[in-house]
Image (cartoon, rainbow, N blue to C red):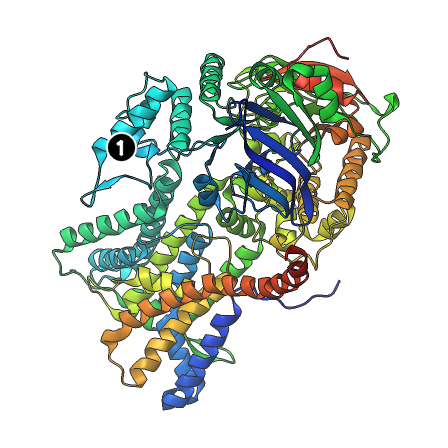
Amino acid sequence: MTPGPTTSARLTGITKSFLGVPVLRGVDLELRGGEVHAVMGENGAGKSTLLKVLAGVHRPDGGTIEVDGAEMSFAGPTDAQRAGIAIIHQEFTLLPHRSVAENVYLGREPVRRMQVDRRRMMADTRELLDWLGEDGIDPADTVSSLSVAQRQVVEIVKALSTDARVLGMDEPTAALADHEVELLYDLVRRLRERGIAILYVSHRMREVFDLSDRITVLKDGQFVTCAPTSELTSEDLVRHMVGRDLGEYYPDRAVPDDLGAVRLALRGAGNDRLRGLNLEVRAGEIVGLAGLQGSGRSAVARAVFGVEPFTRGSLEVDGATRRVTRPRTAVRLGIALVTEDRKGDGLALGQSVRDNTLLVRRAALRGGRSREKSDVAELLDLVTVVARGEHQEVRFLSGGNQQKVVLAKWLAVAPRVLVVDEPTRGIDVGAKRAVHELLRDLARRGVAVLMISSELPELIGMSDRILVMHDGALAGELPAGASEGAVMALATGHGIGEVA
Amino acid sequence: MTWRPRLAEGTAPVLVVLFVLLLGLAIAGPAYAEPSGYLALLKRAAPLMILAIGQYFVIVSGGFDLSVGALVTAGVVIAARLINGSESATARVILLVLGFGLLVGLVNGLVTTKLLVPSFIVTLGMLLVLDGAIFLWTGGAPRGALSAGFRMFGRGAVEVPVLGEVPWSVLILLAILVAAALFMRGGTGRALVAVGDNEAAVRLSGGQVDRLRLLAFVLSGLLAAVAAILLGGFAGVSAQVGDGLEFRAITAVVLGGVLLGGGRGSVVAAAAGALSLESLFTLLNLLGVSGALESAVQGVIIIAAVAYASLGSGVRQRLRWWPKQRSSAAPAQPASS
């Protein structure tokens, strides 16, 4: 072996598309033993996909993967594991009612005389825990009795038990409390000292600067730069992450005359995940709500809509204080929510376009108010749905058309406040533009629109004002057309008030 | 806009099956050469068809109702004991039986939606409770007798202009079927199917998921009581009158192409499934196949129907997949080698 950090794994020119949408477009990545290599980028930049390519979960469309100089082709995660690559995913994969040792050797239990060799399993697990310097965990402990941070240690031990030399971690601090993060830092440093190559995926600036030796930045699936952490400043990083031109077209913003009375207002509102929110959305206005994943963006939408209601402060609709504790109340007050998961909770996929369009009206309003026959065709026209007919099942529609049906479902009850969460996720450019125009059109008719999006160009292009969330609270407000850098700076909790 | 007649997906096969069976009956049995034979078949099938309609509501909204067989027995036994041959008590007891069905459905629905016990377990428990209660109450041999007025609905007929003599049970069945079909075309009916398809979507659309579920169980209980009244009249009083009817009703609904787990299928098809099942048993009987085979045949049908439903989509998917796979693999070959 040559002195200094050796290359453990090298990805070259990796490309990957899903359903024709390129997610990775020629990404290079070099992981060295004893080095923490951070990958940064906005949501959707391709970080997680890259990790999954390395883990053998996704097969790349092009490019090569080398491990210790030998070119590899992974047919599945097991192949990657055999090559010494292990990944800690965002979701935990442990069985809560089994012991630590049983979890570590799940499916690979050592066998002696046709029986699971429990003693060896315990001993080996203990050895790994000792090697890591973790003496607070007993191999015989039940996983459900451990803290979240300890469970993460078990995940890591499980990964190492396959003799992994490359360890990928996807947002490892997402599930941790603040004091547990320090423990994780410590663990990562110990892993580095022991010569493990670590790929650290995160979008938290502070963590990346605290931990990593080298940073690769991805943007829209493309490799932007790779440099030693010591040579980068956070301003550089933000610039690399967002540096793209706003060449897209968005409908004209509201002029002061368009704005009406305050339709939706939160006064010191909060619950388990949100703290002291104060915001107002006026009739005719589109207010953008920015923030990183887990910042509480969607929690605001769910709270306003009564799914996870506010427990503190107050919510006002058209000036009157209201208690919204379930969606039905929200719907009847004229609040609509387009959720981020249209297949999971937006549509009944096996039902027809017509049935989905009328879902809210039928489900939430009394029979007397329904004017079913008259306007379904009009509604579908308005949102420009392309389907074979009203009776086609929505599961056969494209993502864009499905999203339009979701919008039609809400237009059918003429909402006064429209909350949209990722309104254009996973839909094509044409449909995106149609959705954008529709949202602006609704605003012009006096609807108050609160728009959540992790796509910064969209958020900036559409919003009349931008509110940025960080860690369950509002980090600041930016005017229309603010720079992506300004939004990211507030969203990452870095230099609040410095960049504007 | 042009109006095209349409069938809910999965409805066509049961209609084909029904047609073939009816044709088979016409060939095998001389009684089925004229309409009266079919009317008799319909009369025999009416209780099961009504049970299937009730079961449909529960299945399409994502549940099961295993309690209907025991409920039919309970209805008949209670009616016999309370009427005890007295004509004057008939109307009162009929209302009581219907009320009892409604109550059982209400309990099933409330336990399922409020205590969050899976409907499979709730109604299984209800089946056992009713079974036990009937046994305790009757000691195995039901006492009392039904009045002629009560039995009229199951065995009697009424003169209808144009059609001639039509059994009461057929008229009741038709009324229920039409009402059910109209209900399923309306907003509440569509919302019920949507609950079976995606509960979260309905809840987030402001729908009252629990109430819709509850409604399905209440309707199932009520219709089971109606079936009990018809069966009591048709078959007489026994403590075994409802045995196995819950599985027969589920088989009928599945045969009608209704998706187990909910979200898909039409109520008319479920009723057609029940009629097909009854026709099949009649045909087997005509062909001299032992009645003892009935439950075996039913078992095969339920497995085959569900296999067809799940395999069907798999085969369709593969058919769509193959040509695409080939066309994309061909040009990729030279590039990779």
Q: Is residue B228 above or below residue A82?
A: below
| Image spot of residue B239 (x, y percent) | 19, 61
Give the residue furthest to the left: B139
Q: Nearer the viewer, residue B66 or A132?
A: A132
Report the chain holding disc 1: A
Quadrant of residue A78 within the rendered picture: top left
Q: Is residue A109 above or below residue B156?
A: above
Give me the residue at 68% from left, 49% from top.
Answer: A20
The disc labelled 1 sits on which kind of residue? Met
| Image spot of residue B124 (x, y percent) | 28, 50
Q: Nearer the viewer, residue B49 or B59?
A: B59
Give the residue furthest to the top: A497
Give me the residue at 70% from left, 48% from top.
Answer: A401
Q: Nearer the viewer, residue A437 or B221?
A: A437
Residue A320 can be seen in this image: no
| Image spot of residue B1 (x, y percent) | 75, 62
> Which quarter of the figure is the C terminus of chain B placed in?
bottom right
Q: From the viewer's perspective, tell me whether residue A38 is left or right of residue A179.
A: right
Give me the residue at 78% from left, 31% from top.
Answer: A443
The residue pinned by badge 1 equals: A121
Q: Is residue A206 above or below residue A57?
A: above
Give me the residue at 60% from left, 37% from top.
Answer: A11
Count of labels shown? 1
